[in-house]
Image (cartoon, grey):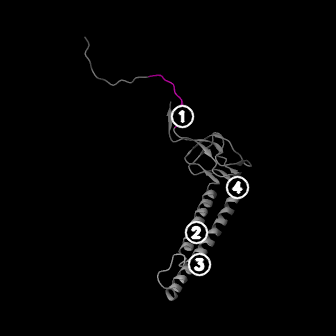
Amino acid sequence: VLDVRTESLQLKVPTQGTVAPRTESNLIAQVSGQVVEVSPKFANGGFFQKGDLLVRVDPRDYELGLATANVEVAQSQMRYAQEQEESEVAQAEWSSVGQGSPSDLVLRKPQLAQARASLDAARARYQIAKLNLDRTEVRAPFTGRVRSKAVDVGQVVNPSMPLGKIYAVDYAEIR
């Protein structure tokens, strides 16, 4: 017969595992163009901080696209303002000459709606051009390390092309 007592006891269990990052990502190009800059931090085994520039694609085409989109917005704004004025003039003319209720076409409502839609479309194209220009800079989404690099200066990249593999260093898992 033994008397049973509770006590703290530390057990050692030998085991094996693989340390793996919790977050691992493939860096993918979102725009096409020639790579004009690769950060020294973007090298196999290199460390980087969140927001660091890792790769830059030649932005000149996208800067020109943004300037063109800006001109389209200005032209569409001018056309919309003209249509507003013409609509008001048509309303005033109908009030002084016409009888009954005028049709939408006489009051230039379809033309005004089209000018408004063209303005909205031009603003959307401007936003797309601005977004594409921003995408020429590939920045680190988190603090981490480079597992592998697949691109270098002078190389031409296309959308969906892998630039390298990175992983976060904030947490690790043992499998």
Amino acid type for the residue under numbered disc 3:
Gln
Say which quadrant the N terminus sits in. Answer: top left
Q: How many angstroms separate mark 1 from mark 2 (CA)? A: 51 Å
* Disc 4 element: loop
Say whether marks 4 and 1 touch (CB < 8 Å): no
Of pointers 2 and 3, the one earlier in the residue sequence: 3
* Residue 40 horizontal/vertical position (percent): 67, 47
Q: Is residue 130 above or below residue 17?
A: below
Query: Where does label 1 land, which residue?
Result: 20
Indicate which disc residue 58 carries: 4
| Viewer-side label of 4, 3 | 3
Q: How many angstroms separate mark 2 from mark 3 (CA)? A: 12 Å
Residue 35 in sight in this render: no
| Viewer-side label of 1, 2 | 2
Of pointers 1 and 2, the one earlier in the residue sequence: 1
Q: Is residue 27 above or below residue 95?
A: above
Of pointers 4 and 1, the one earlier in the residue sequence: 1
Query: Where does label 3 land, which residue?
Result: 82
Residue shown at 61%/61% (left/top)? Answer: 130
Return the residue nearer the eye: 104 or 77: 104
Query: Where does label 2 land, which residue?
Result: 119
Amino acid type for the residue under numbered disc 2:
Leu
* Residue 41 horizontal/vertical position (percent): 64, 46
Q: Is residue 18 magenta?
A: yes
Q: How many angstroms separate mark 4 from mark 1 (CA)? A: 34 Å
| Residue 20 relative to residue 32: left or right | left
Q: Residues within 10 Å of mark 3 (few under 14, many from 20)?
A: some
